Amino acid sequence: MSPELKQRIQLVLAFAILVAGVRVAYVFYQRRSPAAEAARTAPPLEADDYVVPRKLYPFDLKSARQLTRQPVWVREGYRYTYYPYNPATRHADFTHPAGQLLPIERLEIKDVVTDVTPGEADQQQLIAVFEKAGQSYAFPIGSLKAGTYQIYSDEMLFIQDPHELFKHWPADIWEAIEKHQVKPGMNEFQISFAVGMGIPESSMDPAVKTVNYPNGGHPLRVTYRNGRAAEIQQ
């Protein structure tokens, strides 16, 4: 073997060793990076995480009227206000709130129409009309301004029965939900079904979360530990 060939082989081997060393260093860096560490320490997925409710994705008045084709259920109770609605004039009385939609309340949407936005002449509201105790009511599900629709009914309503979507929940959990009760061991999603929207407090501990629930005038304060209700204060 000539000295020149021998030198070339040594250079190739040195380059290969250098590339391998860089690769090993990169792998160790990736394994020790915050993202990789977070992935290793992330809690395992639960059955609720695999539930993907169907959505309508409405983009105008006609597509929003798909809400009339099936019952709907309120996603987050005590968050949305409804108003008296006059079918003859096709207007809601926004000056006199009639109540708040309840947790997973079942509704039959009769129509979706446009109405004025109080105090804003250049904007209209999309309102969903329903009946309750023989009276007509409506609540906003979007807006129309300068020909552009903003519709958020998919974030407000289920179009599938929550009892079917979350049929993996035990019977005692569903019993507590139907009675609007909160029990230790319930997760945050289950409690929102029971008592509606919650307002979280700031926390430095990711394993501990405290949420305040207005609960229709009967406030609750729930502290979750590792995702489950541990302390419940009336």
Image (cartoon, rainbow, N blue to C red):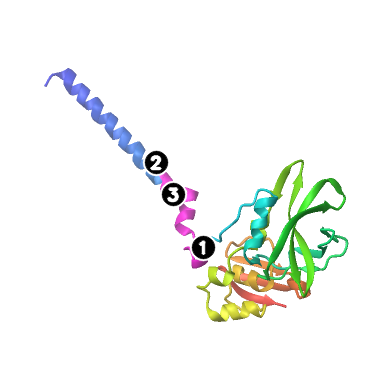
Q: Residue at x 11, y 22 (%)?
A: 1
> Which quadrant holds residue 208?
bottom right
Q: Secondary structure at mark 1?
A: helix
The dot on residue 220 is none
Specify start and end residues of the magenta stretch as a single range. 29-48
Q: Residues within 10 Å of mark 2 (few under 14, many from 20)?
A: few
- Can residue 203 be seen here? The reply is no
Question: Which amino acid lies under the numbered mark 2 shown in the image of this protein?
Answer: Tyr
Residue 32 belongs to the span the image colors magenta: yes
Instruction: State the residue position of label 1.
Output: 49
In x, y percent, where is residue 201?
A: 69, 63
Camera-side residue of 120 and 199: 120
For this orientation, the residue located farthest to the left is 1
Distance, label 2 to label 3, CA atoms, is 10 Å
Task: Check the image and report above or below for 31 versus 54.
Answer: above
Q: How many numbered discs?
A: 3
Question: Disc 2 to disc 1, how far (Cα)?
Answer: 33 Å
* Disc 3 secondary structure class: helix
Judging by the rendered image, the residue that carries numbered circle 2 is: 26
